[in-house]
Image (cartoon, rainbow, N blue to C red):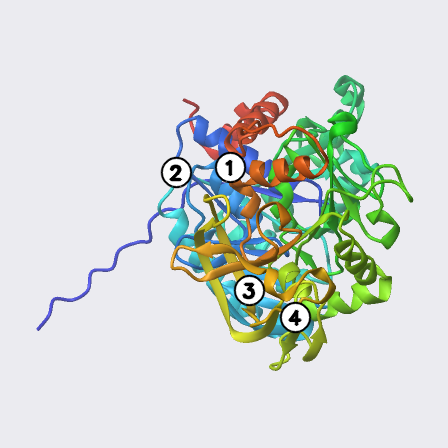
Amino acid sequence: MPPAAVSRPPAPRPPALMVQGTCSNAGKSILAAAFCRIFLQDGLRVAPFKAQNMALNSCVTPDGLEMGRAQAVQAAACRLDPDVRMNPVLLKPCSDVGSQVIVMGRPVGVMRVRQYVDYKPRARDAAFAAYDSLAAEHDVMVIEGAGSPAEINLKAHDIVNMAMARHAGARVLLVGDIDRGGVFAALVGTMELLDGWERDLVAGYLLNKFRGDASLLDPALDFMRERTGRPVLGVVPHLRDLGLPEEDSVTFKEGLPGLRDGGVEGEGGGDALDIVLVDLPHISNFTDVDALRGEPDVRLRVARVPADLAGSAGPGGRYPDAVILPGSKNTTGDLRALRASGMAGELARLARDPDGPVVAGICAGLQMLGLSVADPLGLEGGGREQGLGLLPVRTELAAEKTLRRTAGVHPHSGLPVAGYEIRHGITVGEEGGGAGDAGDPEDARVFLLREDGGALGWSVGTGPRERVWGTSLHGVFDADGFRRHFLDGLRARRGLAPLGRVVAPYSLDPALDRLADAVRAAVDMDAIYGMLGLARA
């Protein structure tokens, strides 16, 4: 007979700090990243976690699984590779009433709200199991909540806020955005709406995005302790231009520093390159342009209506130097929206003009620039939509989602590129082109080549004449050499001398150190370590 199994008590969970907020976009993701880097700097093995993330910005892990971009940034703060256990449930809205549900890195279906509520017990089990597995490998965990823990219509089936805090035994910091106004009412109101056991998990508050003299807040901070029995443990200043990716489309729609609607702003004077990012109703992975934001000769702005595609001199002035069509979670729907707004016609006009801008598309942007997008399985509503006709390619959405990290090369320059692919679309080039007014059919070229020789993108023209191009590779601009080659090509078209060297290497690490330094200076870290039962190095 085999020996009887020996029952062992479960390993104790490590201490956990959880960052919750009074609302969305209070700064939870950035503050969680800051604590990750602080704990790492202090010699601890730390990992991030968010049970459920609703976002359109995602990335691919080394093992080919999909997770939220915010947790990938937090993993970088810990100097860890992204691990799908850090974000076991990802919701990617593809309409006003439905989202693609991704569990442990793989899509399990598109669900409406009530369908997902029914599915949530399975999502909760996956999230809790992922947390336990990840936590067992680390000294301390940094957990991010979602929205507000006081959304009383959601509390019964919560898996990401207080239910997660209770499972992890976490100490909760409640974050309020003081820049919006009403932060003390939001904090007190949140505490009033929490159940007793939930309030017991809250250790204190952080005021985020403060501008001015923090000493003026002293009477309010005293009031908060007297009224709620919890201290304000830090007043974090408004940190602009950190150089870190934004988490989701909420922040993008409200406007990003250095990324403005319509008119051009930024550094670089009259010689700055005017690069325009087209907004889409279901925009995703707009972080693909983050590396451009750090370049000293670039001014980046957002276009939401056709008039925004005018150059820096306004209507009648010169064209932008480049227009970028980003990713989307509903390609066919966003194509219809571009037509309805007049943006599609304006993009086609710009592409036809020999003096017009370079037009580039990334992932869904590539698909939209093509001849057609077909959705036979109804993944995004079904049907076939005519593309903008600027590239000789056709796309069909397939059931199997492509998820992989990818390296390749730009054949004309020989420069390497790397990033990841996240797509249902299968895009193929057409023999003989058919790119309409974008260029002669014979000008169609493979723009990027995957390491295995497969096409990663197509262009009309080659070399300096690559006027219209698209790629399925997210992160294409992260490659320093290729990014500078692209920008110097734009400079040459303007008659400007190329810079010829990488002047702004793209790396998150220095930005994460700056973030950690600012938060460490603003927060009572002795109190944080004390509540976690950790001794400071």
Asked whether residue 220 appears in the rendered view, the answer is: yes
Mark 1 neighbour class, 10 Å CA radius: few under 14, some 14 to 19, many 20 or more: some
Q: Are marks 2 and 4 in contact (CB under 8 Å)?
A: no
Spatial separation of the CA atoms under disc 4 and disc 3: 24 Å
**10 Å neighbourhood of mark 2: few (<14), some, or many (≥20)?**
some
Quadrant that contains the N terminus: bottom left
SS for dot 2: loop
Calculate the distance from the C-alpha at mark 1 to the C-alpha at mark 2. Answer: 38 Å
The dot on residue 387 is none
Going by the numbered disc 4, the residue's amino acid type is: Gly
Q: How many marks on residues?
A: 4
Q: Which residue is mark 2?
A: 139
Quadrant in which the C terminus is drawn = top left
Label located before the other in sequence (4 or 1): 4
Quote the CA–CA distance across marks 4 and 1.
32 Å
Across and down, in percent, residue 455 comes to 48, 61
Mark 2 or 3, nearer chain start: 2
Residue to which mark 3 is pinned: 423
Q: Classify residue 165 as left or right of residue 384.
A: left
Left or right: where does residue 84 sit relative to residue 314? left
Q: Which residue is mark 1?
A: 481
Determine the secondary structure under disc 1.
helix
| Mark 2 and mark 3: Cα distance apart in space | 36 Å
Whichever of labels 1 and 2 marks the residue nearer the N terminus, that label is 2
Residue closer to the observer: 396 or 24: 396
Which structural element holds mark 4? loop
What is the x, y in percent for residue 385? 71, 75
**Amino acid type indicated by mark 1:** Gly
Mark 3 or mark 1: which comes first in sequence? 3
Give the CA separation, mark 3 to mark 1: 26 Å
